[in-house]
Image (cartoon, grey):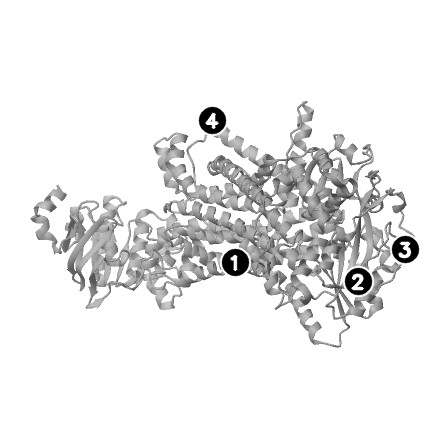
Amino acid sequence: MAFRPVSISTKPGISAAVTVAALILTALLAVLGRAEFTSGLGPADWSAIRFTILQAVISAVVSTLLAVPVARALARRRFRGRGLLVTLLGAPFILPVIVAVLGLLAVFGRAGWLNAGLAQVGLEPVSIYGLHGVVLAHVFFNLPLATRLLLQAWQTVPAERFRLAAQMSLTPYAVFRSIEVPLLRQILPGTAALVFVICLTSFAVALTLGGGPRATTVELAIYQAFRFDFDLSRAALLSLVQLGIAGGTAAAALWIIPTISIGGGFDRSLHRWDGQVGVQQVLDVLFIGLTTAFLLLPLVAVVTRGVAGFAKTPLAVWHAAGVSIIVALFSIAVLLAIALPMAGWIATRPRGGSEAVGLLGLAASPLTIGTGWFILINPVVDPFALALPVTALVNAFMALPFVLRIIVPPMRDTVQVYGRLTQTLGMGGWSLWRWVILPRLRPQIGFAAGLTGALSMGDLGVIALFASPDTATLPLQMYRLMGAYRMDAAAGAALILLALSLGIFWVFDKGGRWHAQA
Amino acid sequence: MLRLEEAEIAQDTFTLRADLSIEQTRKYAVIGPSGAGKSTLLSALCGFIPLSTGRLLWQDTDITTFAPGDRPMTMLFQDNNLFPHLSIQQNVGLGLRPDLRLSIDEKDRVLNALSRVGLSAFAQRKPGALSGGQQSRAALARVLVQARPFVLLDEPFAALGPALRNEMLDLVAELITETKATLIMVTHAPDDVRRIADEVIFVANGVAAKPQPAKALMDNPPQELRDYLG
Amino acid sequence: MKYLTLAAATLLATSASAEPPQLVVYTYDSFVADWGPGPVIEAAFEAECDCDLKFVGMGDGAALLARLKLEGARSDADVVLGLDTSLVAAAKDTGLFAPAKVTADYDLPVTWADDTFVPYDWGYFAFVHDKKLTAPKNFRELADSDLKIVIQDPRSSTPGLGLLMWVKDAYGDEAPAIWEGLADNIVTVTKGWSEAYGLFLEGEADMVLSYTTSPAYHLIAEKDETKAAAIFDEGHYMQIEVAGKLAATDQPELADKFMQFMVSDAAQSVLPTTNWMYPAVAPAAGLPEGFDQLVEPEKALLVPNDAVPALRDEALAEWLSALSQ
């Protein structure tokens, strides 16, 4: 008999984790199985590995550190449109890479608004291309995610703590030290690890904004191995390296996170008394303002171009939009079926290292996974018949680490705070999920589902390997339009994509918080 | 009868030893200095902390390894006795059926319990909308429907004012008597002991002593207890 | 749901033998798009073949070849459409292809001697720019100028590989020096053609690597006369797109028939304004209006198919070292 804090059955969670790991490792083995071992890693591969780690580390550190003041400001300010702003700030994260890059270039590019402005006042133009451009783009993509994760952590601080702080008239610095630092210690390593892993598999962004082959990442080297050299052994080796770096970092980061129970408190809405005036207020307004400008201006560019091209969007785009919505909903269902039991398992463990399993799907090269499964599936079934399930599964895998980051901390708190009560009541199995966990975590589950849907919506991923003309998704159709010179129509499709991604996110996120007191 | 046999409860560097029996339908107060292990004793009885040695017997059944929900006892904690997202009625209902699939008869029992603690009008409210005293009453209603032979209180009323606390203790005493249950409550206040306890378990220096009649003990406390009472 | 009906259709197709024979053609993604040549060609061929033509689109030419290597002889494909001259040697090395029985009077700047692969369209790589720009006359002038260009990565893109071969073929051992000279002109290198062309249209660069036929799209589809292709006096590297029949096909005759159809007037007249390339056989009605306004290079460059693989690896190494400094 194990004395566990709560009677969540761990078997489904462990099975889900094992399934995830097995599906990914099987794909790798399948690629390895077809490989002829001719080549190891060359000097070019090692320099790609170095560059990949360098850019990912910088991107992760910058994104996470910038997120602290932004999340802090958003946590203690109440203003009209705050909810809408928080939703919109999530948009860059779910944009297809090429759309986001074109949006960024409209602002920061050679012919962008920033340089036009600089020219007006007689200043030298700045170039976005280079390592700093790669970091800029990665911050653009990941700052919203980091902010959102931090903000969520902030909101789990019981109102009583801030009341106490207000009562004691603590200075902003004292509030930071006594309430926020412990919180950040818990949430920052995991957040940074997550951003690091996302940036690890970056390819098109790093190449385009890195300005050339100097900015070769491991993912590009994998791509080259598959496509240019058809060197499966090198592709598999590089994939292993990528997994190793991601897995090692993630496990380390998750392992050192202290498990602090954030504590209960009846769900009262959060009022803050600290930092409402003076320097703190100015700083907060500044951070919210700058972040908003940085994140929304490229989106404005995307929307402007999209509106102009909207009329030229062919009918096929709408059909693709339908396919994408189905894929997104499917992905959400698959994700929840994997993530919830996994989170339940992880939350009852003393340390969070097992969460690293969730990062496998993100750290594994989509091309390797896709190819591996293709090798396995092709002899048995027509791959096209499996296009939708495979895509949904892969999308769910990609979203899994984010979702675990979102769900595990509140799940852990729920277990800490209500574990003994549920045990006294003899609650276990479905009753525990139905009456305690799901309602307690509804806002986070809604957020996670919305995020998965949106990510799935914007992902090109493996669909390219499995798609037949009839199951083309919206991003694929958008690329096809671009490939046929039809950039205006593609911009229109990008706008539809943006709207649908945000829409699906909004519906689920809102649904999660509707009538919830948290 | 509940019997804790040669038990040792170890938590980190702290150890508590106990060898005692608890008679049914009596009311026990657990007193002792802060950090002496009063809550630890209750947690061990309830099954939240394992016994490192010894046995826990109930009516000659060894329940040492039983899950908390399978033991003949229920417990009120210092806080978090109610789920804030569920209505009072649902919270109480969980005491009967963890899956909340209540029969009509069971629903009646929930409503009766709520009416017994004076919360009929608040059945559909959520705990956040209730005062501290009302929340305590709701938790008691749940204990009432659970109808376990042993009710353990780990200072659930510590946050209430003196008048309200006395009112709650009287209510507890009434309910315990009505349901012929056994009460084991942690307390700091000698007045509480005099108010409702039949027996006292004094916990100090890593040992939970055998229960002693409350009145005699309080009237003529041994040195250790005298030090504690001051 | 779509994929269910699709799966059902596949099952039905295999169980019911009364159905007309099916010809599976693997091709690159943009070919099968609603606005690409695919739908028109499918309708036209099915009208005369009493068969079911099924296009399967995937990535680009390099992705096609990688896919075929993965599937090997088990492939469902009967015909592959969309490999280009840079890939022909590698494709032949797989041993998966069978000689085609096709005759045509090719209108290509070079003599086509290969009996396995059938060319269906072609183009010249070129830097596209705004007409207002005074374009450089060759790579050296470009390298000496302050002009900014966007190119594609040869490791992930067919045009990128074309440019690599272009410089190597035109300059041989001097190619590294040319690349070093171009390094400060290159704004960035993109994953594929679409990204590069998008960046160019956004104003990120003065010129973009594309095709001499690119201005025809703007001219015909958008009535936009502002785009032009720069003619370089070293000559222009060619890209010839070819179709090949798989040796393992269960429909060899139908496959030959389809490849013959691809060089017939019905298909050739469609390609210029859907694929935006030159047809491999001159259409009876001539080229569409607008194509006459395109500039034509004086000299066509093309590395013989067999020499591509060795040269490619050498040129890539030079390119990487010149641009990584």
Give the number of the disc on residue A25.
Answer: 1
Instruction: Provide the chain ID for the residue under circle 2.
Output: C
Q: Nearer the viewer, residue A517 or C24?
A: C24
Q: Circle 4 — which element? A: helix
Q: Position of residue C180 (x, y in %)?
A: 70, 35
Sequence-first disc among 2 and 3: 2
Q: Position of residue C277 (x, y in %)?
A: 82, 50
Residue designated by label 2: C42
Q: Same chain, marks 3 and 4?
A: no
Q: Is residue B84 visible?
A: no
Decide: is A107 above or below C101. above
Q: Circle 2 — which element? A: helix
Residue designated by label 4: A279
Residue B53, located in which quarter of the rendered image?
Answer: bottom left
Q: Same chain, marks 1 and 4?
A: yes
- For the residues labelled 2 and 3, say whether their Cβ atoms are less than 8 Å apart: no
Crowding near the residue tagged with mark 2, few <14, some 14–19, many ≥20 C-alpha atoms within 10 Å: some
Q: Circle 1 — which element? A: helix
Q: Amino acid at mark 1?
A: Leu
Give the number of the disc on residue A483.
Answer: none
Real-space CA distance between mark 2 and mark 3, rounded to the nearest whole angstrom = 19 Å
Give the number of the disc on residue C283.
Answer: 3
Real-space CA distance between mark 2 and mark 1, rounded to the nearest whole angstrom = 40 Å
